[in-house]
């Protein structure tokens, strides 16, 4: 996981498989960032597995950050989010190849 902070903007680049420990780490980072951010980008492009715990974390982040949250992901993860009905809740983008 890589965290890049620039002023009041944070980009979280997550790689590999997200497990319970990874979700807990993300939860801590998001809690510490709190309301001082103008924008939060969660980059899931290099994630290979994103379990339901991760989906719940994104819902929680949306509640905390509102329109300041943006999620980048693969088409496969975008499909998982859509299957869970979260594509209407989360601002998503997928990289163009």
Image (spheres, rainbow, N blue to C red):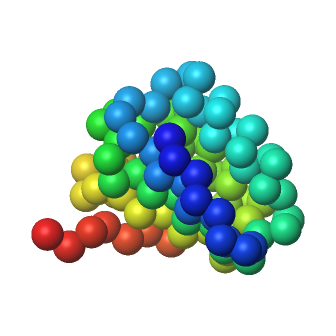
- Percent across and percent down for residue 2 are 51, 47
Q: Residue at x 33, y 54 (%)?
A: 45
Q: Quadrant of the C terminus?
A: bottom left
Query: Is residue 79 in view?
Result: no
- Vertical comparison of 16 with 35: above or below: above
Numbered label tally: 0
Nearest the eye: 36 or 84: 36
Nearest the eye: 20 or 1: 1
Nearest the eye: 19 or 78: 19
- Vertical comparison of 82 with 31: above or below: below
Q: Residue at x 32, y 47 (%)?
A: 46
Query: Is residue 3 in view?
Result: yes
- Percent across and percent down for residue 49 are 35, 33
Residue furthest to the right in view is 35
Q: Residue at x 39, y 41 (%)?
A: 15
Left or right: 28, with 48 as reference point: right
Q: Residue at x 38, y 30 (%)?
A: 17
- Percent across and percent down for residue 90 are 54, 65
Residue 89 appears in which quarter of the rendering? bottom right
- Percent across and percent down for residue 26 are 64, 40
- Vertical comparison of 63 with 31: above or below: below
């Amino acid at each position: 996981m890589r965290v890049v902070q620039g002023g009041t903007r944070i980009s979280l680049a997550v790689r590999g498989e997200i497990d319970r420990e990874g979700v807990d780490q993300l939860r801590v980072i998001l809690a510490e960032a709190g309301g001082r951010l103008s924008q939060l980008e969660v980059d899931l492009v290099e994630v290979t597995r994103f379990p339901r715990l991760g989906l719940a974390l994104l819902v929680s982040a949306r509640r905390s950050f509102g329109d300041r949250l943006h999620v980048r992901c693969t088409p496969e993860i975008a499909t998982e989010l859509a299957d869970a009905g979260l594509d209407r809740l989360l601002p998503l983008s997928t990289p163009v190849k």
